[in-house]
Image (cartoon, rainbow, N blue to C red):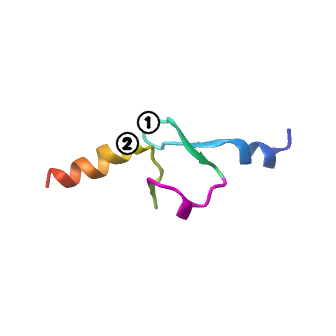
């Protein structure tokens, strides 16, 4: 299989827990939820743990 075709079909993974996200690697970042500039793609659960719970504890 061509490398470019493989990358299009490959899903991105959460940079924290490694879980597969619903986004393909070639999905633009402005079309994603839970993408953090400078860090990468997070799954919804990790994003909530890191950002929502920390905001509520302030």
Residue that appears at 63% across and 56% down: 27
Secondary structure under badge 2?
helix
Q: What's the CA distance linking mark 1 and mark 2? A: 7 Å
Magenta stretch secondary structure, dominant:
loop
Left-right relation of 1 to 22: right
Could you tell me residue 6's position as x and y percent? 76, 42
Tell which of 24 and 4 is nearer to you: 24
Residue that appears at 41% across and 44% down: 44
Mark 1 in CB contact with mark 2 (< 8 angstroms): yes
Outermost residue on the right side: it is 1
Q: Nearer the viewer, mark 1 or mark 2?
A: 2
Q: Which residue is mark 1?
A: 17
Would you call the spot at circle 1 few (<14 residues within 10 Å), some (14-19), or many (20 or more)? few
Q: Which residue is mark 2?
A: 46
Outermost residue on the bottom side: it is 30
- What range is drawn magenta here? 26-34
Residue that appears at 67% across and 54% down: 26
Mark 1 or mark 2: which comes first in sequence?
Answer: 1
Determine the image quadrant of residue 46: top left
Could you tell me residue 58's position as x and y percent? 14, 55
In this view, 52 is above or below 10 = below
């Amino acid at each position: 299989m061509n490398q470019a075709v493989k990358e299009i079909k490959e899903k991105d993974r959460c940079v924290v827990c490694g879980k597969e996200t619903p986004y393909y690697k070639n999905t633009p970042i402005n079309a994603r939820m839970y993408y953090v500039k400078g860090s990468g793609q997070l799954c919804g659960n990790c994003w909530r743990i890191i950002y929502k719970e920390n905001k509520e504890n302030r």
